[in-house]
Amino acid sequence: MRLSRYFLPVLKENPSEAQIVSHRLMLRAGMIKQASAGIYAWLPLGFKVLRKLENIVHEEQVRAGHIPMLMPTLQSADLWRESGRYDGYGEEMLRMQDRHGRDMLYSPTAEEMFTDVFRANVNSYKDLPLTLYQIQWKFRDEIRPRFGVMRGREFLMKDGYNFDLSKEDALHAYNRHLVSYLRTYERMGLQAIPMRADSGPIGGDYTHEFLVLADTGESEVFYDSEITDLTFGDRDIDFDSVEQCQAVLEEFTSRYARTDETHDEALFAEVPEDRRRTARGIEVGQIFYFGTQYSDAMGAAVQGPDGKPVSIHMGSHGIGVSRLLGAIIEASHDENGIIWPEGVTPFHVGIVNLKQGDEEADSACEALYDSFTAAGLDPLYDDRKERAGGKFATMDLIGLPWRITVGPRGLKNGVVELTSRRTGESEELPPEQAVEKIIQIYAKHRVTGL
Ligand SMILES: Nc1ncnc2c1ncn2[C@@H]1O[C@H](COP(=O)(O)OP(=O)(O)OP(=O)(O)O)[C@@H](O)[C@H]1O
Ligand SMILES: [Mg+2]
């Protein structure tokens, strides 16, 4: 993309309505525009990162054996009456009527819809296990939407639902989700810690929230500092292996890590004092096993091996895709702007032409642009007739991890300058070497999606 042809409405001033840095930077970098409270237009740069996150989520879900599909956002109230949640859900549910006076709602989550599709199509134990998921917009009429996309009313969520014959199988699905979520967040450059969460009226131990530590997080968290040393890395997991998935669950959840909702002072006191941490966190996902609650209420059973009907054990598993943008920026920025992790950056590299209109500089930039494109990378070329200072400020604000600066003086010596956004360090090297280096950096950050 050439910046002169792009739509990147950056703001010079700090928008006064933004209370936290990620919201401020998303507005300033021209990623989003508020349409009404908690509802946003996704401008091209924001949309690009959102799509990247979606693609990573898809890749990791499919890797775990889960099947993507798409449900409607507008759903019939009758379906929700069957589960009892139409009356139970409360003010967060946006309700409406169509022209025939039929009650409808904008889906805040989709257990009912998925259970309905399941019961209409699956009759035999032979079709299990099955995990279906979608990445779809949700609406919750939050009483206090704030912090930009962090707590929106309309937001993008990955929600997945497992259908299993037994509690044992459903717990394997639970573990599979935990493993795939660890991979997903790490690919996004985030550490998200699974913490024991509150399972509400259903009870049981089977729910974890994933939290990114950040001062601006809305949850208070308590944990054993050893947990922050754990990384998933690029281990090769067989998602069908009960033992392997269980081992990862144990590794990542055996230390104390809880939100204020489940915090237990007596248990926390057993953690050695120098490892006890209290902090704040952003919830970027949650996994949940809830048994046969929905399948019983909605009559979703299959014929078991002995011909008798078996209630389906279910769980649901969510990732806050649009909230993740805010969480990533909270975790990765400086006073000049965003610093995208390589895995999610909207463009792989920025090309800054110090002397637009200079024949040599222009053609060196074009050559770099072509090399990156030919290698399947996505460069952003600042080809505007602007001062260098302004170009640098824009690149810093929008946070591309790598910048190549091209000017007549360097070209005379056969070099361009390669700068890391994160460290600020620069090196001079021949253009071909700069290209080679960028290609290598991104070799393990390829995102293709579905
Ligand atoms: N209003 C919102 N805006 C943006 N993302 C959200 C919002 N509500 C939930 N999410 C994201 O969707 C994920 C799955 O939804 P879930 O039903 O677990 O949310 P939740 O527990 O009600 O969230 P919260 O406690 O933050 O209100 C959450 O982990 C979160 O990342
Ligand atoms: Mg939650």
Image (tube, rainbow, N blue to C red):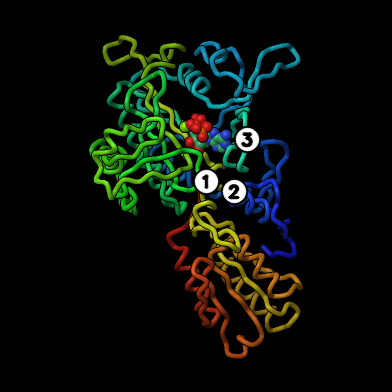
Front of the two marks 1 and 3: 1
Q: Seen from this angle, which residue lies furthest top?
A: 308
370 vs 246, left or right, is: right
The answer to whether mark 3 is within 8 Å of ligand 1 is: yes
Secondary structure of the residue carrying numbered label 1: loop
Closer to the camera, 327 or 214? 214
333 vs 235, left or right, is: right
Mark toward the start of the polypeptide (3 vs 2): 2
The answer to whether mark 1 is within 8 Å of ligand 1 is: no
Q: Tag 3: residue type?
A: Pro
Q: Which residue is mark 3?
A: 145
Secondary structure of the residue carrying numbered label 2: loop
- Give the residue at x 47% y 63%: 442
Image coords of residue 394 (percent x, y):
66, 65
Q: Which residue is mark 1?
A: 216
Query: In the picture shown, does residue 18 fall above or below 310?
Result: below
Image coords of residue 269 (percent x, y):
27, 38
Q: Tag 2: residue type?
A: Ile
Location of the N terminus (image quadrant): bottom right
Query: In the picture shown, does residue 267 fall above or below 202?
Result: below
Mark toward the start of the polypeptide (2 vs 1): 2
Tell me the CA gap for discs 2 and 1.
Answer: 7 Å
